[in-house]
Image (cartoon, grey):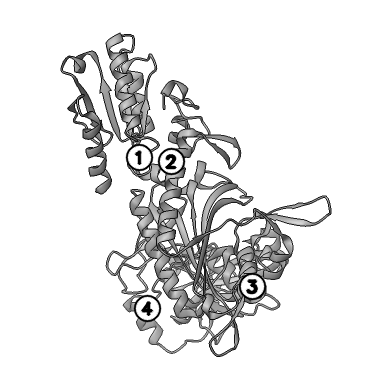
Amino acid sequence: MRFSKLFGKTLRQAPAEAENISHQLLLRAGMIAQEAAGIYSYLPSGWRVLRKIENIIREEMDKAGGQELMLPILQPFELWQQSGRYVSFGQTMFTLTDRKEHKLVLGPTHEEIIADLARRYVQSYRDLPLLVYQIQAKFRDEPRPRGGLLRVREFIMKDLYSFDADEAGLDESYRKMSQAYQNIYARCGLSTSMVEADSGAIGGKESHEFMVISETGEDEMVFCPHCGYSANVEKAQISKTVIATLNEVKEKQPLPLEEIATTEQKTIEEVANFLGVPQEQTLKAVFYIADGEFVFVVIRGDLEVNETKLKNTLKCNELRIAAESEVAEAGIVAGFASPIGIKGVKVVADDSITLGSNFIAGANKAGYHFRNVNYPRDFQADIIADIALAHQGDKCPECGGKLSSARGIEVGHIFKLGTFISEKLGASFLGQDGVSRPAVMGCYGIGLGRLLAAIVEQNHDDNGIIWPLSVAPYQVYLCPLHMDNPEVASAAEKVYQELENAGIEVLFDDRDESPGVKFNDVDLLGIPLRLTLSPRTLQSQSIEAKWRTKKETRLLPLENLVAEVNKRLRERLAR
């Protein structure tokens, strides 16, 4: 490809709306263009990268036993009613009505469609296991598209679905996909971590995300450097055992409830300091509205509520902090509240309340708290569950060591769905014993645009992108200097034709631009190998070779140049 003909222009500065580094660099490199919020066009060089990522994914899916197919973007809304998942997807689901007033869905995912196909074509245990996948557009009406390709409303996804006869079969399919994902990321030049994750609107009993560590990542993961435990903060657990002095408190018999004046003290920190107790010895009250219902949440004072866990516990679709007026309407005295004596309100408690005794909690009247509050003697909870948010420095649930945390970008998510979708869609099979059973499902997704952006986030410097050779838009950047020199122009044209004829992917910078402009563009575009031809190198019948990741250069003879270039490309790919 000749640079002068390449559709898309490089930019010296990123547009003001570009938030993170991948967004900035992909726009500046002329690889993507924004059409609307969360909607992007891939320009030719960006599309080349995406196609290479797609081919790597396809090869690994096929190697793992996957069969590629293509499912419709338009889906009957009735299938989503059957599964019931239209409720959990809520307003993120794009819907439309055709001319016959039939409601349709722009597919945010394809579990319903594939389960409906399995209902028709999977009849016996002999048809299992089955792994089918596609690479296709998805649509989700994200409330806040951001981060360039990291959170969009239209995106290309690889989604594979597994059908097995039993849980053991699902475990094996899950293992295969986990390994295939690790292979994909390694081939794309990415370092990833597999972490426990929340299943979200997709559902299922177990899921894992693959995370790329990045300061600009919108997700947070916690991990234990001692035992290897790792999880998305939405899912992460912590050890809530208290320090030795509090263990001594726990061993004491519950003491009588005592009302104490705390006139000016409302926050946990203020109350704990005033009474001379650690925050672990207090109970915190937080108020939510869950699908229109007022919910009183109580948790140990040193902990915070994990709203994802709370939403899953309540099985609600919408969750938000209650407004002051809603708290007052419920008869709650903010700043001095506890579940003691509360009537007609759903109470959800973190399981940390069971790990101590003689807590400090609100007395439900202004200016007063209770000392020696004990569960279940003094109050009841409708639900007790783990709803605590994990933080760096908390205790690891596996080994008790201190947890660390990092920001990350999710580049893949795999789910053990089980049978809840296959049961509702009728995707069953006859077992060896002649009994009909629902197929055990798994689903496995990779967003290609997000993966492309994550590669940039992890592979760049101050000058631009540094593409791994396996996904680079071009392998070689042919950079002749002083194209007004006939000898340089002629030699460059000859080298370009030789490289092209040998099947080497080359971007020929045939523009009449200064060396500075050309060198800036090659660094911005991130093409792995730069070949620079100049009057100086022509004198020795050579060309200057430089890897994007290295500072040093090397002269290669123009004679047998193709063989030399091919050798270096093969060596780089083999690493």
Looking at the rendered structure, which numbered label has been put on residue 246? 4
Q: What element carries label 2?
A: helix
In this rendering, position of residue 498 left or right of residue 295: left
Query: Where does the image place residue 131, in percent across and percent down from the top left?
Result: 50, 67
Dot placed on the residue nearer the N-terminal end, 4 or 3: 3
Residue to which mark 2 is pinned: 49
Q: In this view, does 449 lie above or below 293?
A: above
Residue to which mark 1 is pinned: 467
- Between the C-alphas of marks 4 and 3, the distance is 56 Å
Residue to which mark 3 is pinned: 119
Q: Looking at this view, is 78 or 229 the one in front?
A: 78
Dot placed on the residue nearer the N-terminal end, 4 or 1: 4
Which residue is at a point 63% across and 67% down the rendered structure image? 117
Q: Is mark 3 on a helix, strand or loop?
A: helix
Q: Are marks 1 and 2 in contact (CB under 8 Å)?
A: yes
| Quarter holding residue 247 | bottom left
Q: Which amino acid does label 3 sit on?
A: Arg
Q: Kindly report which numbered mark, 3 or 1, lies closer to the viewer in this rendering.
A: 3
Dot placed on the residue nearer the N-terminal end, 2 or 4: 2
